[in-house]
Amino acid sequence: MAFDQLGLSPALLCALNELGYDTPTPIQAEAIPLILAGRDLLAGAQTGTGKTAAFALPLLERLYPNGALQSGQPRKVRALVLTPTRELAVQVHDSIRAYGKNIRFNSTTIFGGVGMGGQVQALRRGMDLLVATPGRLIDHLDQRTLSLRDVEILVLDEADRMLDMGFLPALKKILGQLPRQRQNLMFSATYADDIRTLATELLNDPAQIQIAQQNSVAATVQHRVYSVDAERKKDLLIELLAQDSRRQTLVFGRTKHGSDRLARQLCQAGFKADAIHGNKSQNARQRALKDFKEGRIHVLVATDIAARGLDIDQLPVVINHDLPMVAADYVHRIGRTGRAGCDGLALSLVCREEQGLLNDIQRLLKRDIEIAVLPGFEPKQPLRAGSDAQRSGKPAARTARRGRSSQPSGSKHHAGKDQRRNSNGGQNAGRRSDSRGSQPGNRSPRTPR
């Protein structure tokens, strides 16, 4: 099946073609026709299945049939996408903008951990589509800088994570601000009892889709973690790269600006490096990837969204400068090495603040990862060996995601109101988490996320 068989307009198909996407993933092939038909949807899908495009493409088609705006209509929020973290909000918004590049709609993203001034100004200009985290959205609703009375489509992305992070009271408050007649789309990696309860309250005769996600890694990949303080990650990365400066190495950063900065710092240190991320044009990304494949640069720094679909033969090393916020994304990242029976090396530079994220990864892999300390880079707060989460079977990452300490180098951290609030009920606990983030993982070649 191809995208042109799913009922999408030429405006969207043209954008997909320019992005190099021609074949939908299973969830896209199943979800898009159902959403276009106006059905509510409950979809079981993890990061890596292509779920963002599964709701973004039909959402754009329903709001703008055949890629056309309704002339003369005032700008109002007609679609609301809720995500658990600010990084995921940014990534989802970037994807929607990329898919809708041939449609002149207005959209923005709002999240905690930053000032509200710029967000208020953007909202005053009028929005067709809004991507938001629950805590900051509540702030805007409380200050009446935003109205949701015209929302036609609601999307809950990673609903299980939102509930796990304490957002249920915030979600219920938001739902109370929405019109009763609307289309609801709910995506969750798990179907725990609280998710089923929320689905019963939220969805009207929903279609259901369950997409399996394979969280396996090649046996030929060697995993190693280097325990290091956040502020010394860059120096340790340079030290590791210097051990073989001509070895092709893919480095993952968490943010676009951080990846750009890291690539510049590596160039200043004498390495041939470049970065690819969502702020770069498709031509710039393709040029950087071509240079990397042909050996003109030896280090490629990438964010998850920009690195989706990368197909690099015999890549010897992947380095996580920042751990991903979702454990499954680790599998997608290191899947770039150890291919076709070749040996691969997956190195992660991990500070104490990322201990919970490391525990989540070890739980997913069902194994401990070797933790090493490079002489001269001994951390003030070393990592704990093993994983309490593995022994107890309970998630560990929640304690590491609260933004109580500085984030790793290359990722700007804002100590905003969402972090300062203590857990006084689920709503405040949810707001506290808005400044944390997630980078969706890499995707299969020629399939959008």
Image: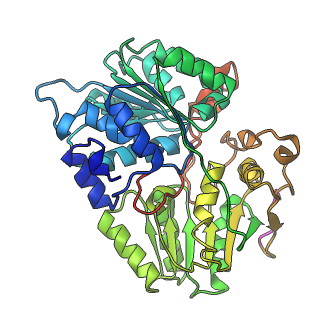
Among the 4 quarters of the image, the one containing residue 234: bottom right
Q: Nearer the viewer, residue 40 or 92?
A: 40
Q: Nearer the viewer, residue 182 or 247?
A: 182
User: Which colour style is shown?
Assistant: rainbow
Question: Residue 48: x and y, percent?
Answer: 53, 51
Q: Nearer the viewer, residue 263 or 219?
A: 219
Main SS type for the magenta part?
Answer: loop
User: Could you tell whether 129 is left or right of 221 in the image?
Assistant: left
Position above or below: 305 against 63? below
Is 378 colored magenta in this rendering?
Answer: yes
Which residue is rendered at x = 62% and y = 18% of the image? 197
Question: Residue 280: x and y, percent?
Answer: 35, 62
Let me know if residue 170 appears in the view. no
Which residue is rendered at x = 64% and y = 80% of the image? 342
Let me know if residue 63 appears in the view. yes
Count of numbered labels shown in the rendering: 0
Question: Residue 132: x and y, percent?
Answer: 45, 33
Where does the magenta region start and end?
Answer: 377-381
Position above or below: 345 against 359? below
Among the 4 quarters of the image, the one containing residue 58: top left
Which residue is rendered at x = 50% and y = 75% of the image? 312
Position above or below: 220 against 321? below
Is 233 colored magenta in this rendering?
Answer: no
Question: Residue 77: x and y, percent?
Answer: 31, 25
User: Could you tell whether 281 is left or right of 267 in the image?
Assistant: left
Among the 4 quarters of the image, the one containing residue 52: top left
Which residue is rendered at x = 37% and y = 68% of the image? 285
Position above or below: 116 against 273? above
